[in-house]
Amino acid sequence: MTLRIGFHGAGFITRAHRWLLEHAGVPNQLVAVHDPDGARADRFAEQTGAAAVSEHALVELADVVFVCTWTSEHPRLVADAADARRAVFCEKPLAVDAPLVEQMIAGVSKAGVVNQVGLILRFLPGYVMVRHLLDDERAGHVMTVNLSDDQYLPVQGQYASTWRADPARAGRGALLEHSIHDVDILHWTFGPVRSVSAVARQHHGLPRIDDATVARLEFESGAVGTLTTVWHDVLERPNMRRLEILCERLYVALEGDSDAVLRWRFAGEDEHTLSGVELADAARASGGEAAGPLVPFGAGHGFNPMTRFLEAVRDGAPPPLPFAEAAAAHHLVDAMYQSAEQGGTVIEVGEP
């Protein structure tokens, strides 16, 4: 069985997903694409052999619908796919706020369609390995975690997504549009969050588009964390992350994403360093990898999330990262923005 793929959107992220689909190991064919920019859709169609079609025709032609448009369009396009009983993959963030995300989760659940969200960091070896290290009883309790993430303002350069300067389409700025990844990793790795506070700035003068946000998180475990996310104009830094963790008897530092270098040291032991394929092999051996084969990804390597997703569609099985897994991160982001709008007040949060 060859799964027929349709893409809403023909931009930067669609090209990335197309490459992952080509290396997924599950037979699939790109059959349709739609983009509000007709010329861009036509170019993508010429390059791939797909047909540039209307939104309605795309859903009719495809077995699996990929939603890779600006954020405000996600709920409508996901609903169209679910109504037609099509499997659906939606890029992050799922929607501009958590209530809309909850509606999307309810919609795909009611329709009974396989669904997955594009929170790619969970499929990178470095983050898989960090979770493995923290599970080691030698580590003791997590005490503090600090995650910093910076990227140039993505209306330029390789991203060229000018819609990210428009709150009607993007919703908000760096915290939602980019660091939903980071908030998801913090929740996934360190557990439920008790409260958050945040400050947000708009140095580029774009209304509601935050470009420098610092958040504080208190976890139910007793750990305390910070997240710093910045959109700047240093084009030589397209995307950089650094994660630093201090436990009672373990230090961990992870720098980078697909090209990450991981360093750690348990009390009384030598420091260890892993990167590249060696880091991926260690992550796979840890038993925490369930996202498909290792593939070149960005400047390094990642586990292909499309493999397990397409297998789930083909077999009618649970996908590795359904929409419901993104709910917590969206509620936390909403709480952070609420705090920022109230001058950094502490917002108590609970599991959605």
Image (tube, helix red, strand yellow):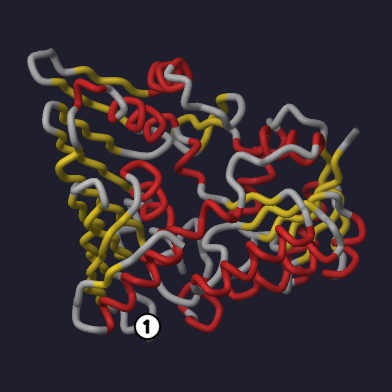
Seen in the picture, residue 48 relative to 9 is either above or below; the reply is above
Q: Is residue 124 left or right of residue 147?
A: right
Instruction: Decide which of 286, 61 is in the foreground and name it.
Output: 286
Q: Residues within 10 Å of mark 1 (few under 14, many from 20)?
A: some
Seen in the picture, residue 186 relative to 254 is either above or below; the reply is below
Displayed quadrant of residue 230: bottom left
Amino acid type, callout 1: Leu
Residue drawn at x 12%, y 26% is 249
- In this orientation, does residue 324 appear? yes
Residue 114 picture location, percent across and down: 73, 48
Q: Is residue 229 left or right of residue 3?
A: left
Residue drawn at x 39%, y 72% is 334
Instruction: Decide which of 155, 9 is in the foreground and name it.
Output: 9
Residue drawn at x 68%, y 60% is 67
Seen in the picture, residue 248 relative to 268 is either above or below; the reply is below
Instruction: Decide which of 318, 254 is in the foreground and name it.
Output: 318
Displayed quadrant of residue 336: bottom left
Residue drawn at x 37%, y 83% is 206
Seen in the picture, residue 46 relative to 262 is either above or below; the reply is below
Residue 275 picture location, percent across and down: 34, 23
Mark 1 residue element: loop
Residue 312 picture location, percent across and down: 73, 38
Q: How many marks?
A: 1
Q: Is residue 289 left or right of residue 306?
A: left
Give the position of the N terminus as an image quadrant: top right
- In this orientation, does residue 203 appear? no
Residue 283 picture location, percent across and down: 42, 22
Q: Can you identify the residue that label 1 sits on?
A: 206
